[in-house]
Amino acid sequence: HDRPLVHLTRVLEGYFDFRGHFLSPERLFSFVLVRDQSQGNPEDVLTLGAHQVMLALGSLIGWGRYTRHQRILAVGAWLGLGGIIWLMMEPSSFIWELLPLLPYAQHPWRWLGVTGIPAALLIGLGLEGLKQPRWRILGAALASFVLVVGVAPLLYPPGEFIQLHRVTLTDLHTIDRILDWIGLTSVGELLPRTVTASKISGSPLEEAYRRGEEPIRLDFSSLPSGAEAIPLSLHPLDQRFRVYLPEEAILRFWVFAFPGWQVMVDGYPVETWAEGELGLLHALIPSGRHKVRLCFCGHWSWRLLEVFSAGLWILGLVRWLVYRFRERRCKGRIQIASSSIPSRKEWVALGIFWVLISGFKFFYVDPYTGWFRFRSDPNMPPGMAVRANVDFGGQIRLLGYTISVPNWRAKPGDTVVLTLWWRGLREMETRYSVYVHGLEALWPNRLRFQSDHMDPGNVPTKASQWRGEYYIRDVHHLHIPLDLPPGPYYIKVGLYEAKNPGVCLITDEGNDGYLLPTLLVNRPMPASARLPEPIRFGGSLELVGVELPVRIKRGEPWSLWFYWRAISPVKKSYVFFVHRLDAQGQMRGQQDRPPYWGTNHWPPGEIVAVPVTLEGINEPGFYRLRVGWYEWPSMEHLRLSSGEQFAIVPVTISVR
């Protein structure tokens, strides 16, 4: 019932929405790959491990030799493992939406930690299914070796280890400021609802924490003139003061007004409330001399949960004692299969095996080899297709990029994956964000699609990865709108201050961003749209296909696509016209306009889709279309081989 007291719903939004964190089968069943030690933001290892899955499949080999109990155990383990795997993949999204608390897990891949239980049971059953004891010990050694080698890359994590011993509150505050966290939370989800501020930048209590002192939570600036306040005792959750007030006053305390905080005057609680966008605790104190106490006294329901938790511990202890007592009484009647317990020789053999494995790692692999810890040149990351080397403000360098579409061609509705590779040039005190904008190549260069990241590669530019010998891999997904007109689009990359989006980092060339090669967006022509014979205009353009409805409703606008091909380079930009003709050949509407992508830029041989939207037709009947090209303002037409200035599209449209 405490969820409404805080902003807990924030952990269900944006990046933390579970819908964006399902795993694909390819990733879920992949091997653990060796990670590049030069990458400052290596991808999380989110896999069951193909080696572990293959070992678990061994449980099916000895199925015929299993006892009834072992078969039940194997079936249960496989069902459990399959269910957990299903919960980590997108088909289970309706379960995540149905169960009210499950989305708070945020990331479906967090179930990976549970998969170790059924997987270990299945691997053990597979070894138990071997006939001879010597084969079981050999199988155990082999399985152990495969498991160790399969996760060996994880024994050499990239980056520097963070020393957590002797951590102070000052260190935690520093991390908060670097990463723009709020109380070590990502989005301030544990702040009380009374806190409405979108940003919390600093606190007057931090200076006391830096000195190693307990801060005074009474705001002395809220005392009226002539008042006095002397701290008597200072503790994190309990502070006491001797206060003199010449008149009744409202005192403010440097704590969020979270339920559980109380202010007591001479041992009696007084009314408290939240005030301001920070939701700080306020209390009305009468005039005179008083002992004022600020304490976090909790809530009765929390105490009830503590009692319930203690009761569970006691119940578990009693259950264990009863089990031990019964075990002693029935000791003589319990029979244990000797084959299930390793013999002394088997234990010795396993011990020798692990000593050899450990010695090989510590005395050969670690000091003499680069196995499992590959390190690339941070200026030439693996996978980077095009080198850029563009410096932004002398602080960040765009090393290069890779795009997922061949020849920089895409179609409306596509998702283009653009990977940027960055490297920090010096220590930065400003947090920068990165943008990728898709701009019309024609004036006025309107923004048509984009991708913005709060931090390049999800690494704040104030973090240590930007100061060392690392590169940052930054993946952007550009969703091309379905209604985007075919033509060329600039891809512009830049950086701006996270707190001041209007302030951009300028490149060494004096630009506010860097232009990548032009992306050509074009709609592919479906086979059904192809005309039996192309219609050629002027020896330079030919109509090869038409996509239009054959029936439309009265009064409704309708869209159609014409597919043109440049036979040879076109030197002029022509205007395309479409005339609507009734059954008697009379013109009942038209549209004249140059295509978004001018004909003088069409590459020869490229089929270019030209969209047209026509107004609705109010009169029912049958209609045909007349199309052609002319130059403005000379009105010089591109003519057919017959000399005509237009062509009739061989499709009849019915309006009802």
Image (cartoon, rainbow, N blue to C red):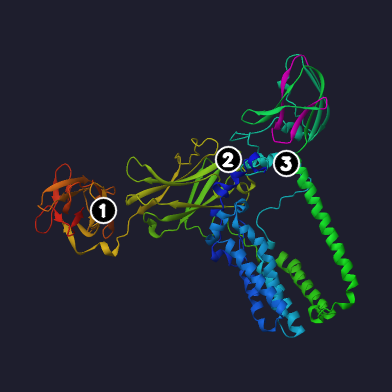
- Dot label at residue 171: 3
The answer to whether residue 529 is seen in the rendering is yes
Look at the picture and state if 504 lies above or below 485. Answer: above
Label 3 Cα neighbours within 10 Å, binned few <14 / some 14-19 / many ≥20: some
At mark 2, the secondary structure is: loop
The correct choice, above or below, for 638 with respect to 285 in the image is below
> Which of the two labelled residues, at mark 3 and mark 2, occupies the earlier sequence position?
3
| Image spot of residue 338 (x, y percent) | 82, 81
Kindly identify the residue that appears in the image at 87 percent across and 66 percent down.
324
Residue position for label 1:
560
CA neighbours of label 2 inside 10 A, class few (<14), some (14 to 19), many (20+): many
Identify the residue shown where x is 19% and y is 55%.
654
Amino acid carrying mark 2 in the image: Arg
- Label 2: which residue? 431
Q: Amino acid at mark 1?
A: Leu
Q: Which span is picked out in magenta?
A: 245-267
For the residues labelled 1 and 3, say whether their Cβ atoms are less than 8 Å apart: no
Among the two numbered marks 2 and 1 on one chain, the one whose residue lies closer to the N terminus = 2
Is residue 243 shown above or below 623?
above
Residue 410 coordinates in the image, percent (x, y): 38, 56
69 or 199: nearer the viewer? 69
- For disc 1, the neighbor class at 10 Å (few under 14, some 14 to 19, many from 20) is few
The residue positioned 60% from the left and 57% from the top of the image is 108
